Amino acid sequence: DAGVIQSPRHEVTEMGQEVTLRCKPISGHNSLFWYRQTMMRGLELLIYFNNNVPIDDSGMPEDRFSAKMPNASFSTLKIQPSEPRDSAVYFCASRTASSTDTQYFGPGTRLTVL
Amino acid sequence: SQKIEQNSEALNIQEGKTATLTCNYTNYSPAYLQWYRQDPGRGPVFLLLIRENEKEKRKERLKVTFDTTLKQSLFHITASQPADSATYLCALGLSGNTPLVFGKGTRLSVIA
């Protein structure tokens, strides 16, 4: 298996632009997580899905952030409009339905908003 | 308030020595705890899991302890090598099928 796939790996955009981050989880995994990592705040959970259904989006910072999972093999995280304070590394992770199972992380998308 | 604290942002250690990293938590009741390794430019990678009813877990040069009374986990790397240099994250697993809660991590540097 190729592991969790994220695209793009790097994104540089200007304030006010729309940004879409993409994630393909590991086949057979039922849960998908979106995290944001910064030096100041560490790894923060933004939203997670179980069986393609959003369960908890309380970590989404503002209405500018939205996430979808239209099917078991694809998810997007969208920021519209983007702001400089959104600059961070965004990780997608997936795991099986067993809560103690390992979370497998993608390589991350480094977002820079100018 | 709920907190997870990894006691050092950075830890420098001489090659061959044992590195000990600490994870303390407040106002959580984890059912298990996991440790991850993160290299620069990469996502975290799972290392070890320890459950609340387990005192100690070992894997090769790695050892994890879990003390639910002290609300603390210790992560040890024996005979440390420069290749062990990375950031190590602890993560609490709560009841039910809920996401892990991560600490900020400790950046370990093993000096040859």
Image (spheres, coloured by chain):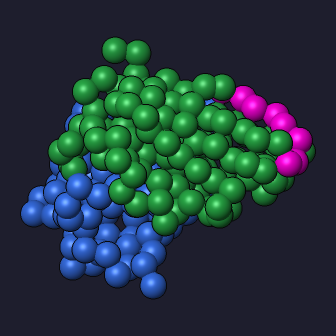
Chain colours: A green, B blue
Instruction: Say above or below: A21 vs A36.
Output: above
Residue at image point 16% right, 57% down: B51
Total count of labels: 0
Whole-percent x, y for residue B62 in the image: 30, 41
Quadrant where the N terminus of chain A sits is top left
Picture quarter containing residue B65?
bottom left
Residue visible at 21% across and 42% down in the picture: A97
Q: Is residue B36 above or below residue B22?
A: above
Left or right: A108 in relation to B23: right
Q: Residue furthest top?
A: A1
Residue depicted at 23% across the width and 55% down the height: B97
Residue farthest toward the left in the current orientation of the protein: B53
Where residue B70 appears, x then y in whole percent?
A: 27, 78
Q: Is residue A3 magenta?
A: no
Using the rendered view, name the quadrant where residue A103 is placed: top left
The quarter in which the C terminus of chain A is drawn is top right
Q: Is residue A12 magenta?
A: yes
Q: Residue furthest front?
A: A70
| Rendering coords of residue B19 (x, y %) | 43, 49
Which one is nearer the viewer's eye here, B63 or B47?
B47
- Residue A2 visible (yes or no): yes
Q: Is residue A6 left or right of residue A79?
A: left
Q: Which residue is nearer to you in this view: A52 or B104?
A: A52
Q: Which residue is depicted at the point 34% across and 30% down?
A: A72
In the image, A64: left or right of B12? right
Residue B80 seen in this snapshot: no
- Up/down of A84 relative to B8, above or below: above
* Viewer-closest of B17 and B71: B71
Across and down, in percent, residue A41 comes to: 62, 62
Residue range highlighted in magenta: A9-16
